[in-house]
Image: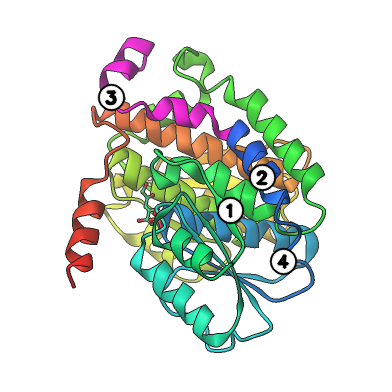
Amino acid sequence: MLDEAAVRRVDRSGAAEHLKALPDQVARGHQQGLGLGPLAANRRVVVVGMGGSGIAGAVVSAWLAASRGLAVIAVNDSKLPAWVGESDLVIAVSYSGNTLETLAATREAMARGSDLVGIASGGTLRDLCSGHGLPYLPIPSGLMPRSAFGFLFGGLAAMFPDTTADVKTGSEALRLRGRKLTPDVAEAKNAAKKLAMRVKGRTPIIYGTPTYGPVARRWQTQFNENAKVLAWASTLPEADHNELVGWAEDPTAKRFVPIFLRDPEEAADHRAMMDATRDLVKGKAKVEEVRAEGSTLLARMLMTIQLGDWTSFYLAILRKVDPTPVAVIQKLKERLAKG
Ligand code: F6R
């Protein structure tokens, strides 16, 4: 069902090749970003972007908060927080360079006199940066924004000081793990194929600790866009104070598949909450648990993203939908562009 021929038949736009390129993208994006220098060192930083671009900011923010105690604010909106001002750095990330919300926030940053950097493959964001002599990181064009995650993440990470060792370990780990997830690896040995088979027919709800929140969100959005299914992401411990009741009492719980993203170094209280929640939910729905491996937090976060990307890809194949097109997003953008 998920052999290479079946994959080729459904993956008409070649999403698999982009998934394979993730480790290289991270390394190349980072290398290129280093050229701009550590622009984000020792200051307040806001990363603004939507969807497949915005998630890069959220992942960087969660990683740097947990590993270095840095406060990087990820914004997925056309509005910047009111406190952003002249002394702050705003990094605008838009793969197309034409997303309305990101451009509105970029113009707002300019009006407030904030320092600004653009990351895009072209479009209006590139023109704004070149027109105003602002630093700009060009990303290769011709991809879907979410397929350029590695470039966007790597480039963004490079703007913070001393990220080279972490990013190198991360991209190496992705390279090794990636080989076990590609379409030529049979189902029995392919964790992403196996998980896609188990998820099929149910709605995924992905849980992580706050550090893994953006990773869970990436899983959700990849299920949404690649497999074209509804999915949600949520974080613990917050969900223990509300959603848990739904799991315990909603008679439709079996239609959903809770996926717990686990990290071997999660804090003891988080571990206890994750274990207890998983055990309580177990009686109500079939539970999935994904245990990250890797020598650093970043490697584990990136490898978990990689597994989610491939799982959503194989779910698309099982559902016989080309993972790449997201026609309805395009339609909405066209309508909004007309005003
Ligand atoms: C499409 C995708 C979308 C876009 C979003 C913002 O692959 O993932 O979520 O990323 O619509 O567009 P860009 O990234 O061009 O600013």
Q: Are marks 3 and 1 in contact (CB under 8 Å)?
A: no
Counting other residues with Cα less than 10 Å from the Cα at mark 4, is it few (<14), some (14-19), or many (20 or more)?
many
| SS assignment at label 3 | loop
Q: Report the residue marked by disc 3.
A: 12
Residue 21, given in percent of the width and then of the height, sits at 54, 29
Callout 4–callout 2 Cβ contact below 8 Å: no
Q: Are marks 1 and 2 in contact (CB under 8 Å)?
A: yes
Task: Check residue 32 in the rendering and tell me which mark sits there, or answer none.
Answer: 2
Name the residue that disc number 4 marks.
40
Whichever of labels 3 and 1 marks the residue nearer the N terminus, that label is 3
Task: Measuring from the top left, give residue 146's x and y in whole percent.
Answer: 43, 45
Q: Nearer the viewer, mark 4 or mark 3?
A: 4
Q: Is residue 291 at all visible to an observer of this figure?
A: no
Magenta part of the protein: which range?
A: 1-22
* Marker disc for residue 258: none
Tell whether 231 sits left or right of 83.
left
Where is mark 1, residue-wise? 137
Indicate whether 254 appears above or below 16: below
> How far from the left and from the top, in percent, is residue 189?
53, 16
